[in-house]
């Protein structure tokens, strides 16, 4: 008998609703859910492959332990006993600072990652925390922290109401959105083109650039100069008008002086966009009824990534587009409590509260930079990393200078990976603990509804049952072992303390609808749910739209979401400033001290001649790929090779490169060979390789991916250069030499 399930796609930030039809334990069909309140039927090619991911014979169903250099399948108790036996001697001899953790991007897509990674970090008792954030998004956290005091409050382009969207280094037609959750991004972009303008700044003619109203092929790494010139033009032409937030914005004078020398004429030679065009772009942006500037990977994963992110939001602020409909807005997940009368202000935001051991690099958001993980493993002395926990990630393919990291991982005394595959990274583990498939676990997007362009929420129960423990339980047991409570300790220890913490916080908070209520009563009211769902229900019921455990019987609760499987939509985003400003001054800071200091580094760089290299490497994204982890799905990798080195025809002729032939690409740290694709889609002087490929490592078990191995672009990215303010890696504008093979 067939059944239909409404499932929120967990594969990217877009959170599309899927209609999954099953017959027994088989998936019969997956298509877009026309009734989903947010995605309304949109689906991309990846979304329909949940079946293939679920059935993939390479996906791990049981823990693996390495014995005599080979993985053997073991039971769960044996796996945790092995971790306990191997870990404790390392802690006893070298202390907890010898432990480190890497968190991969899939953690943002699971309930387990959102709720139960934190207890493992706490149990680890070490500051050696690394994640994918310092590969792709830390600049945005740092500017959000410095400018409005909340590093988690990403500025979101209000796509459905804007008249003018400026996209720098982003390709949302293909990525379906990054640091902004908006299913059917392509449809929303088309609608903006229809009613206004989409301007794309990108060295490549990406799919988004093709669909845009206009496209400017900028020199990689120079978006900051374009933005400074646009800000300069705003002041020079009298276009700077902060509007409603004027009394709540500080630092305008400093900005005006700082950008004075960055005129359109001064930067045109560096960024490759002529002064007249920069002026016109600025005037149109400022004159639009509403406008939003949005920068992503190409603009931020560069040497001045944080300054670029800052300048993007300065442009939004000084044109009156910060926190207004059609401009840049801030999310309001329906479980949030927002008080518009709140007095602005807070503790503010700081980076560099502690520094890494080997190179003294500052933390940001409690994490050390990706560029220094190998240093921490290789550098001898007290605190040298000897054991790693790798939670759902593949840094041997996603971190800069990844060949070095590969060798460093091989030198560790012990590694535990939580992963559904034996990847290029998890092959180094001594124990691998697999999570469930996406169709065997429940789904609730804490992270992405907190970045969404509407106040939406949905919950998906598991489609299939399984005996395999849920990742929430895997992480709770891991926290117990790492914390010294033993391999046999009950995961309920972790679950109950988290639930208790949440209840305590609510019944003692005057703004909560359950303030002062009896804890036993609330605990009893959620006791019938699985542990993670208890926390979800508590959060939903105590938010602005919440049922408050009986206070508003029609209010939001987990049961209400289960009764509404296509999600609930509480409307468009609302203005949140000044109430939501959390800087120490209570104002939006356009000139926070770290930005002012780094601006001098930028000035010095601008004053020197650009690098002598005549070719620079940039990345790119493909609709059928998702970082390193969708390449084991046949339907997504079949067809013509997508991992090619794109080269402009002029460069190809100059270098003697033929379409389809192979070329060697060398940077300071490595050399790879890739098939050449001669195309005018890249700017002259720019070559492009997608990231996340290179599946020919001998120890990995990704049989389909190995047949379409591609080239590891991070064998070329350099861990000696990074964005100083955020510690973010530099993945774009890498100087390279290219030659025919
Ligand atoms: S766009 Fe993202 S969320 Fe939507 S179907 Fe594709 S992978 Fe899934």
Image (spheres, helix red, strand yellow):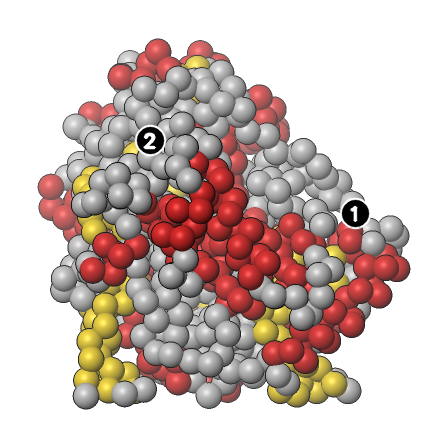
Q: What separation in Å lies between label 1 and label 2 (alpha carbons)?
A: 42 Å
Confirm or deny contact between disc 1 and disc 2 (CB under 8 A). no
Image coords of residue 713 (percent x, y): 55, 65
Quick one: 143 or 516, which is closer to the camera? 516
Decide which of tag 1 and tag 2 comes sooner along the chain: 2
**Quarter-wise, where is residue 698 in the image?**
bottom right
Residue pointed to by mark 2: 338
User: For ligand 1, which image quadrant applies?
Assistant: bottom left
Disc 1 Cβ-to-ligand 1 distance below 8 Å:
no
**Residue at point 48%, 38% (across, down):** 505
Locate residue 68: give its quadrant. bottom right
Q: x and y percent of residue 272 in the render?
A: 40, 40
567, above or below 294, in the image: below
Left or right of 182 on screen, residue 718: right
Residue at the disc numbered 1: 358
Pick whichever, 703 or 658, lies toward us: 703
Query: Element at badge 2?
Result: loop
Mark 1 Cα-neighbour bin, 10 Å: few <14, some 14–19, many ≥20: some
Q: Nearer the viewer, mark 1 or mark 2?
A: 2
Screen quadrant of the N terminus: bottom left
Task: Provide residue 387's location: percent of width, then percent of height.
Answer: 75, 63
Can residue 22 be seen? yes
Give the structural element (helix, strand or loop) at label 1.
Answer: loop
| Residue 373 visible in the current orientation | no
Badge 2: how crowded within 10 Å, few (<14), some, or many (20+)? Answer: some
Residue lying at 55% horizontally and 61% vertically, measured from the top left: 492
Which residue is more in the foreground, 401 or 20? 20
């Amino acid at each position: 008998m067939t059944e239909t399930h409404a499932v929120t796609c967990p594969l990217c930030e877009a959170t599309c609703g899927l209609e999954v039809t099953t017959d027994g334990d088989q998936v019969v069909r997956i298509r877009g859910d026309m009734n989903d309140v947010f995605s309304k039927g949109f689906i991309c090619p990846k979304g329909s492959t949940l079946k293939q991911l679920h059935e993939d014979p390479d996906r791990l169903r049981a823990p693996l332990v390495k014995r005599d250099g080979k993985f053997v399948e073991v039971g769960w108790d044996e796996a945790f006993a092995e971790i306990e036996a191997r870990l404790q001697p390392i802690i006893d001899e070298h202390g907890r600072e010898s432990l480190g953790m890497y968190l991969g991007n899939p953690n943002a897509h699971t309930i387990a990652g959102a709720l139960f990674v934190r207890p493992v970090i706490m149990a680890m008792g070490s500051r050696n925390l690394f994640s994918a954030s310092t590969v792709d998004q830390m600049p945005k956290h740092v500017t959000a922290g410095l400018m409005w005091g909340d590093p988690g409050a990403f500025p979101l382009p209000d796509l459905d109401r804007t008249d003018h969207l400026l996209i720098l280094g982003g390709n949302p037609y293909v990525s379906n959105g990054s640091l902004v959750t908006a299913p059917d991004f392509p449809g929303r972009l088309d609608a903006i083109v229809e009613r206004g303008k989409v301007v794309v700044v990108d060295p490549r003619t990406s799919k988004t650039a093709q669909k845009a109203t206009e496209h400017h092929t900028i020199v990689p790494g120079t978006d900051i100069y374009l933005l400074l010139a646009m800000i300069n033009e705003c002041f020079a032409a009298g276009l700077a008008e902060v509007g409603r937030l004027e009394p709540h914005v500080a630092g305008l004078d400093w900005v005006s002086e700082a950008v004075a020398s960055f005129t359109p004429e001064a930067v045109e030679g560096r960024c490759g966009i002529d002064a007249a065009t920069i002026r016109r772009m600025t005037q149109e942006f400022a004159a639009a009824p509403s406008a939003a500037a949005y920068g992503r990977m190409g603009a931020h994963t560069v040497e001045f990534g944080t300054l670029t992110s800052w300048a993007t939001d300065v442009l939004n602020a000084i044109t009156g587009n910060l926190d207004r409909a059609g401009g840049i807005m801030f999310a309001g997940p329906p479980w949030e409590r927002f008080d518009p009368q709140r007095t602005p202000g807070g503790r503010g935001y700081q980076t560099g509260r502690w520094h890494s051991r080997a190179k003294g690099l500052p933390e940001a958001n409690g994490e050390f930079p990706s560029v220094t993980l190998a240093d921490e493993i290789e550098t001898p002395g007290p605190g040298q990393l000897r054991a790693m926990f790798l939670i759902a990630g593949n840094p041997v393919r996603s971190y800069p200078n990844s060949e070095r990291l590969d060798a460093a991982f091989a030198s560790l005394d012990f590694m535990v990976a939580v992963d559904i595959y034996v990847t290029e990274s998890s092959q180094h583990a001594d124990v691998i603990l697999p999570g469930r498939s996406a169709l065997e676990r429940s789904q609730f997007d804490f992270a992405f509804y907190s970045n969404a362009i509407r106040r939406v929420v949905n919950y998906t129960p598991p489609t299939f049952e399984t005996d395999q423990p849920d990742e929430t339980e895997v992480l709770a047991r891991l926290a117990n072992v790492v914390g010294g409570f033993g391999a046999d300790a009950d995961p309920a220890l972790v679950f109950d303390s988290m639930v208790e913490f949440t209840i305590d916080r609510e019944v003692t908070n005057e703004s909560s609808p359950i303030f002062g209520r009896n804890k036993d009563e609330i605990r009893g009211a959620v006791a019938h749910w699985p542990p993670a769902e208890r926390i979800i229900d508590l959060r939903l019921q105590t938010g602005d739209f919440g049922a408050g455990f009986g206070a508003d019987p029609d209010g939001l609760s987990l049961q209400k979401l289960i009764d509404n499987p296509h999600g609930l939509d509480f409307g468009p985003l609302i203005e949140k400033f000044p109430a939501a400003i959390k800087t120490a001054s209570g104002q939006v800071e356009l000139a926070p001290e770290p930005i002012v200091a780094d601006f001098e580094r930028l000035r010095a760089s601008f004053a020197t001649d650009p690098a002598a290299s005549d070719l620079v490497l940039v990345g790119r994204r493909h609709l059928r790929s998702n970082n390193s982890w969708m390449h084991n799905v046949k339907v997504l990798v079949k067809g013509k090779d997508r991992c090619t080195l794109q080269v402009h025809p002029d460069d190809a002729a100059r270098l003697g490169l033929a379409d389809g032939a192979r070329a060697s690409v060398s940077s300071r740290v490595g050399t790879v060979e890739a098939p050449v694709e001669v195309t005018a889609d890249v700017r002259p002087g720019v070559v492009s390789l997608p990231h996340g490929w290179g599946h020919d490592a001998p120890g990995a078990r990704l049989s389909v991916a190995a047949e379409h191995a591609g080239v590891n672009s991070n064998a070329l990215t350099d861990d000696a250069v990074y964005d100083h303010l955020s510690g973010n890696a530099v993945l774009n504008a890498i100087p390279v030499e290219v030659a025919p093979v």
